[in-house]
Image (cartoon, rainbow, N blue to C red):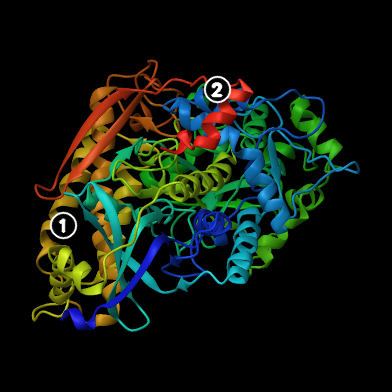
Amino acid sequence: MENQAIGFYRYHTVIVGSGAAGYNAALRLYEMGQRNIAIVTEGKNLGTSRNTGSDKQTYYKLSLGGRERDSVEAMARTLFEGGCVDGDIAYAEAAGSVRSFFHLVELGVPFPTNECGEYVGYKTDHDPLSRGTSAGPYTSKYMTQALEKRAQAYGIPIHDRHLAVKLLTSDGGKRACGVMTLDQSRQGFCVFAAQNVIWATGGEAGMYKSSVYPYGQSGGSGVLFEAGALGKNLTESQYGIASTRFRWNLSGSFQQALPRYLSANPDGSDEREFLMDTFQSAQKMINAVFLKGYQWPFDPRKIEGEGSSLIDVLIYQEEFIKGRRIYIDYTRNPAVLEPAGKVDFSILSQEAEEYLRNCHALLETPFERLRAINPAAIQVYLDHGIDLSADRVEISVCAQHNNGGIAADCWWESGISHLFPVGEVNGSHGVYRPGGSALNAGQVGGLRAAERITHRDDGQAPEREEFLSLHEAEIAQVLRFAQGAAAPGPAIDVAQELDALRRRMSRFGAFIRSEQGAEEALRENRRQWSRLKDSHALSDLRLLPALFRLRDLLTAQYVYLEAIADYIRHSGVSRSSYLIHDPQGELPHEGIDECFRSSAGRPENGMIQEIRYRAETETCETAWRPVRPMPQPEQWFERAWRKFKAGEFYR
């Protein structure tokens, strides 16, 4: 393709992604006076923000109601103490939480208040105070819709159906200066020249087969790794029980309603309850199900003592070791609740019994209990053609959120200057983040990025011919790969290749890991990459976007697996939401498979792993550093005022 066939746009700042984080960044820039900006997105209606949720999707913020005492420093301390979190980032997320929350409120997101107007809250996981709030199962969707509506009112240009395939850089790769995209509406390429790039493509959802990410969410970190961006805490993800036909977290009230867990052969035969095969006490089993509502992410610390995460282990054992299918059923009670053929709540813990009583949910079936606790949860499934009063739901332990991502500073600027990863793509979270803090981080990140961009004089990007000439080598690299899709020879099956990649990650890089498995996955990844790098002809060029996604995911998966392998060699201790197999370790519970044997030890939560992909050699380099400590920001008003007016903070 000649340069004349490449579309060209020139903006001051380009925002890649149209979820809650991307739209918010665009609004913040506009409201600070930036007009020469645009959003570039693979699909306006795709992505996690718009298409996912949970029974009561949480937004985490500074406490704003009741008698609990809270402060910016206290919230920052909570985020920091989650482990592997830089103190300056934790402080910035806490300091920006109220401003970001009320920005959403003023845009119309229906967060509830009490009769006096207080924004009441509740405790979420890893939360010492009641900082959680929710607008219901679709909180992030409401956020995205409200932000999009304002962006449209402002007239911010949105370039839809543009898949970002290359980050363009200058100064030897040290500075971001644009994005190359595949325009799916005309099946051609475009270049967006920009002085700043905000990257809001979400987590690497497309890497997993067992996933609760929506089908329209793929990711985009591979493009940044190829450009030399530094990965941070890539080992830290969250996994939990979710339905697979309709991808949705089965947390909160879905578990507190006390459903049945069933296992069956692939053809549906031999259906039976299976949890009591391992749990030694009916009381511990049913209360573990209840606690799964509060303790939804898998946590290796919660296996011993027949804790709630033993359920995740047993699901994995049934699915991946025994080859069976797993279901949750709301139509009938677990057998342990009907010891004499009639529901009996006497085996419930005091906490579970009081919760159900206060919800007026001490009722005959799981469905009736769920309807009493949270009728909106039932409606979510009805909206997708699933009637929980009649249909059982197939489940798995699924990838749900990446706490790691691209490394950046407390202004959300990466090591590649003028590149700002915001939202889930940013590695601001550590090991144990409070539930809902990701939504806050995405909003604060866009605010901080906009502030730094606005306070810098970046000038203008070069005109078309000069820009294309300066980046001729980078553009040619993309075009050569695209031309290979039209080359003669046997065509590859992109869907089959993507499926193999995803199965690999769910087997070796999800919540059950081992050094041997990580090394095997790396070999498989490199074989697949070597095979496809130079030979990737397509039967239909309309598959070109899928081919570029495959290319992106192969790079991202390689970097993630290298990070996992390095962590196992460095520490080998289970933490966060994954268990690391150690053949010489201890089995956390009798009666479970040897693959769950792991070593005891204290994780190094004060050290952060960073990793860089070297595209020229197709290798990775890892390093470990201490977390940046909690800062002591200026608190004397006159001094802070003087520095603020001088713009010292933004430099």
Picture mark count: 2
**CA separation, marks 2 and 1?**
50 Å
Name the mark on residue 462.
none
User: Dot 2 surroundings within 10 Å: few (below 14), some, or many (20 or more)?
Assistant: few
- Viewer-side residue, 144 vs 494: 144
For residue 136, say whether it is visible: no
Name the mark on residue 634.
2
Q: Is the C-beta separation of discs 2 and 1 under 8 Å? A: no
Q: Give the residue pinned by disc 1.
A: 529
Q: Is residue 78 above or below residue 558?
A: above
- Viewer-side residue, 325 vs 100: 100
Pick the quarter of the image with the C terminus: top left
Q: Is residue 599 above or below residue 509?
A: above
What residue do we see at 25% from left, 64% from top? Answer: 497
What residue do we see at 29% from left, 22% from top? Answer: 571
Residue 295: x and y in percent read 59, 34
